[in-house]
Image (tube, rainbow, N blue to C red):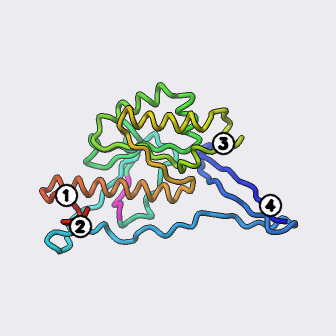
């Protein structure tokens, strides 16, 4: 008889885990765990062309700044095609920025468990952080969960009576009031890391092109 059970793991005590479903194949308890099966991230550089010729090698890769208070930071070492290096630095807002763009760009990371605690129990403090983020040209809050995860009932591991509508509604209101995009990713941390790396590297590339008189475009007639 086939049975299903959900295993919920969150960002607890500095350790990140994921929400999985285990299918019990037989009555002896043999289980095969379902894991996300996304395609591998791109291995090449972000292509930049001018007059039909690639100038990609002329464009440096960003150095990501990680706030010193970030207890369990993303690991960008899997994306050498996008990210040159990582450095720890005390940031005035958010968890991540880029060297040279400290006053322009900020990314705030929230695991699902941290998000629930923040919007329910630490609302005033979180909104003050959001107000600081409005001073940055590029800003976003990245959620280590999908919208479906945020909207689904929270298992007892999260130790909360918060209603999913209260959490999702707060994020919608936050985006509308402060103009801060909310990026939903995945409970599967490698996917969340990939999204963050892509977001950071692309913002840096457009900024670098703009700063060096090359126009805010990767390829003429395209993005």
User: Which numbered dot is residue 3?
Assistant: 4
In this rendering, position of residue 47 left or right of residue 116: left
Of discs 4 and 2, which sits in the foreground?
Answer: 4
> Is 50 drawn above or below residue 137 in the view shown?
below
Image spot of residue 150 (x, y percent): 57, 44
- Name the residue located 40 percent from the left edge and 57 percent from the top edge: 197
Q: Disc 4 versus disc 2: distance between alpha carbons? A: 50 Å
User: Along the polypeptide, which appears first: circle 2 or circle 1?
Assistant: 2
Q: Disc 1 versus disc 3: distance between alpha carbons? A: 44 Å
Dot 2 alpha-carbon crowd within 10 angstroms: few under 14, some 14 to 19, many 20 or more: many
Range of residues picked out in magenta? 82-86
Image spot of residue 138 (x, y percent): 31, 44
What residue does disc 1 label?
209
What residue does disc 2 label?
48
Instruction: Give the main secondary structure, helix, strand or loop, of the magenta stretch.
Output: loop
Q: Nearer the viewer, residue 26 or 16?
A: 26
Give residue 115's quadrant in the image: top right
What residue does disc 3 label?
153
- Name the residue located 21 percent from the left edge and 55 percent from the top edge: 208
User: Along the polypeptide, which appears first: circle 1 or circle 3?
Assistant: 3
Q: Identify the secondary structure beneath mark 3.
A: loop
User: Which numbered dot is residue 169?
Assistant: none
Image spot of residue 166 (x, y percent): 56, 33
Please say if the residues under marks 4 and 3 sit with CB atoms less than 8 Å apart. no
- The quadrant of the picture occupied by the C terminus is bottom left
In the rendered structure, does residue 83 fall within the stretch colored magenta? yes
């Amino acid at each position: 008889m086939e049975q299903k059970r959900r295993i919920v793991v969150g960002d607890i005590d500095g350790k990140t885990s994921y929400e999985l479903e285990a299918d019990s194949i037989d009555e002896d308890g043999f289980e095969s765990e379902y894991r996300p099966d996304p395609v591998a991230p791109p291995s090449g550089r972000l292509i930049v062309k001018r007059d039909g010729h690639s100038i990609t090698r002329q464009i440096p890769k960003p150095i990501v700044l990680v706030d010193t208070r970030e207890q369990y930071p993303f690991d960008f070492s899997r994306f050498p095609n996008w990210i040159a290096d990582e450095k720890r630095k005390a940031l005035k807002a958010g968890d991540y920025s880029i060297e040279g763009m400290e006053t322009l760009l900020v990314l705030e990371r929230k695991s699902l468990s941290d998000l629930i605690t923040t919007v329910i129990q630490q609302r005033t403090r979180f909104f003050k952080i959001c107000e600081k983020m409005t001073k940055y040209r590029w800003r976003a809050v990245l959620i280590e969960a999908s919208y479906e995860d945020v909207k689904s009932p929270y298992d007892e591991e999260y130790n909360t009576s918060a209603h999913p509508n209260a959490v999702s509604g707060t994020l919608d209101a936050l985006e509308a009031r402060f103009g801060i995009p909310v990026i939903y990713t995945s409970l599967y941390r490698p996917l969340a890391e990939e999204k963050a790396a892509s977001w950071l590297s692309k913002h840096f590339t457009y900024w670098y092109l703009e700063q060096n008189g090359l126009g805010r475009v990767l390829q003429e007639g395209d993005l």
